[in-house]
């Protein structure tokens, strides 16, 4: 499991460690790790041109000390302070002692730019002086962000104004949520974690990896029959959108369901493609309601939710006007799977505010509905029903932003619910497999939803091998 920690947790661990170490030791560790990554990226340090954008706090300090280390190895290092009156004094002295220079403007040529403007102490988008420096970074230089790209909020990934886009981010002690959640995540480039010895408490965000998913996947045993493996009921599709039914069923079949039961007006289309599907109501171990059902089907959604002891996944049109009290009153798991627009409608806010503050939105929905919530998007997030760490999906690919892809995901997650996984596990494992299947199917080229469903067995095999 990859875990990310809040700024508050990182600061607490930092204080605890600093109390036991000589002054400056922690920054020295950070700078040494940073300089080592930069040296590796440069290949040949001697004679290279390095620019240090130095902010007023310790983030600037890290960058200046790392610059000093590179200068001692023969790099031509120029520091450009964001505010000449406020620059880390120790870092500046070290850089000067190593032969580095200080200039008021960004040099025209650079092989590598260290973004040491703001770290975890940054608040909001870059102020004008910082933004002006960031804008002068030439596109052909390699940009290495110190701890995180300046202008990205460490706790949320929010970017509320100008911000640096890095090729590589060297982060200290722990991943911060802002490195893993969009829009921040799309600015970090490759992330390198430098261990500085922090002893961290609870994470606020976690990302599953292959081993975690393999551990969570329900695998049939010799004594499993189709009912023990879980029957998924799929209420999906309409005359207008029969394809959504076919795709949700495809996801459910590939998610390890013992059987899939289809309820709705697209039975012919479903059976033509999947003759193994049961049609009509009957006992199920989980319901998937909503993909492609269109408006005016609230009664069917209500009927599934009223079965309080059966897990239910609610997606797409099923989410319209969903009553928090009904969901809160259920005993079995409920998993809601909105995209940003649907989440915005449920929260009564503009879509943009969900896009800009994805973590806050998914937490708020989970709290309001007392349900697990999977917020789809470029970085899919899954919040558990009772609070606790949010899961961010690491396998997503932009190719998955294709019609019907969400229908496959809902069927897949429904099958995992039927297999006995709790809501947030079902959602996060489904997102993981779905992302991996998308990557395998796309392989760098456009992909359609059916191909994602068809690649699910390969993704599954990849995870458990
Ligand atoms: N924690 C750890 O374990 C370790 C932490 N370490 C390092 O310390 C870093 C944190 O350092 P930090 O606390 O000094 O804050 P930092 O990020 O330099 O910024 C604060 C300054 O920025 C300013 N400022 C704020 N917002 C702004 C904006 N939008 N636009 C412009 N300016 C803005 C703010 O100004 P003010 O608001 O006070 O006017 C203040 O002067 C951390 O990221 C890591 O690199 C490592 O050395 C080792 C271990
Ligand atoms: K930075």
Image: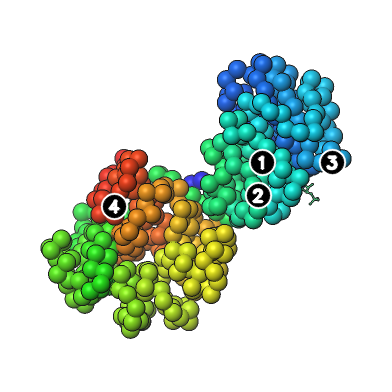
Position of residue 257 measured from the top left corner of the image (x, y, whole percent): 25, 61
Position of residue 80 measured from the top left corner of the image (x, y, whole percent): 76, 33
Position of residue 281 measured from the top left corner of the image (x, y, whole percent): 21, 77
**Label 4 crowd bin: few (<14), some (14–19), many (20+), radius 10 Å:** some
Which label's residue is closer to the chain start, 2 or 4? 2
Which label's residue is closer to the chain start, 2 or 1? 1
Considering depth in this image, is 155 or 4 the residue closer to the camera? 155
The mark closer to the camera, 2 or 3, is 2
Q: Is mark 2 on a helix, strand or loop?
A: loop
Q: Name the residue under label 3.
A: 86
Q: How many labels does the image show?
A: 4
Quadrant housing the C terminus: top left
Q: Which residue lies most toward the bottom here?
A: 299
**Label 1 crowd bin: few (<14), some (14–19), many (20+), radius 10 Å:** few
Q: How far apart are marks 3 and 1 (CA)?
A: 20 Å
Q: Name the residue under label 4.
A: 448
Q: Name the residue under label 1.
A: 135
Give me the residue at 81% from left, 41% from top: 83
Please report contact status of discs 2 and 3: CB closer than 8 Å, yes or no: no
**Label 3 crowd bin: few (<14), some (14–19), many (20+), radius 10 Å:** few
Q: Distance between the residues labelled 2 and 3?
A: 21 Å
Colour scheme in the image?
rainbow
Q: Is residue 367 left or right of residue 249?
A: right
Q: Mark 2 points at which residue?
A: 162
């Amino acid at each position: 499991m990859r875990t990310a920690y809040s700024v508050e947790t990182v600061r607490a661990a930092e204080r605890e460690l600093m109390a036991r170490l000589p002054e400056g030791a922690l920054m020295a560790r950070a700078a040494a790790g940073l300089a080592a990554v930069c040296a590796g990226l440069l290949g040949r340090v001697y004679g290279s041109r390095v620019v240090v954008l130095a902010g007023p706090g310790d983030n600037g300090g890290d960058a200046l000390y790392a610059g000093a280390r590179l200068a001692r190895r023969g790099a031509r290092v120029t520091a450009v302070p964001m505010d000449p009156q406020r620059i880390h004094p120790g870092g500046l002295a070290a850089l000067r002692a190593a032969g580095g220079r200080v200039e008021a403007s960004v040099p025209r040529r650079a092989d590598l730019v260290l973004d040491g403007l703001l770290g975890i102490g940054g608040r909001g988008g870059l102020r004008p002086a910082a933004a002006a420096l960031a804008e002068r970074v030439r596109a052909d230089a390699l940009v290495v962000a110190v701890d995180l790209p300046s202008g990205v909020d460490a706790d949320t990934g929010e970017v509320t104004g100008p911000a640096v886009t890095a090729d590589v981010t060297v982060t200290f002690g722990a991943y911060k949520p802002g490195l893993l959640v969009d829009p921040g995540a799309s600015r970090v480039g490759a992330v390198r974690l430098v261990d500085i010895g922090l002893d961290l408490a609870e994470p606020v965000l976690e990302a599953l990896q292959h081993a975690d998913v393999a551990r969570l996947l329900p695998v049939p045993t010799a004594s499993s029959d189709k009912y023990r493996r879980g029957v998924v009921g799929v209420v999906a599709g309409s005359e207008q959108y029969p394809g959504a039914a076919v795709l949700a069923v495809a996801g459910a079949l590939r998610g390890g369901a013992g059987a899939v039961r289809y309820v709705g007006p697209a039975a012919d289309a479903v059976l033509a493609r999947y003759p193994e599907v049961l049609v009509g109501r009957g006992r199920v171990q989980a319901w998937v309601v909503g993909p492609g059902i269109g408006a005016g089907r609230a009664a069917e959604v209500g009927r599934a939710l009223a079965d309080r002891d059966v897990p239910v996944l609610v997606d797409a049109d099923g989410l319209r006007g969903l009553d928090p009290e009904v969901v809160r009153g259920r005993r079995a798991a409920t998993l809601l799977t909105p995209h940003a627009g649907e989440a915005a409608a449920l929260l009564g806010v503009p879509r943009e505010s969900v896009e800009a503050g994805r973590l806050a939105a998914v937490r708020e929905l989970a709290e309001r509905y007392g349900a697990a919530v999977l917020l789809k998007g470029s970085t899919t997030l899954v919040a558990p029903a009772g609070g606790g760490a949010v899961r961010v999906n690491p396998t997503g690919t932009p190719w998955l932003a294709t019609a019907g892809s969400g229908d496959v995901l809902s069927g897949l997650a429904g099958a995992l619910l039927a297999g006995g996984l709790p809501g947030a596990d079902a959602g996060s494992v489904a997102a993981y497999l779905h992302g991996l299947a998308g990557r395998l199917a796309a392989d760098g080229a456009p992909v359609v939803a059916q191909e994602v469903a068809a690649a699910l067995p390969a993704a599954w095999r990849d995870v458990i091998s």
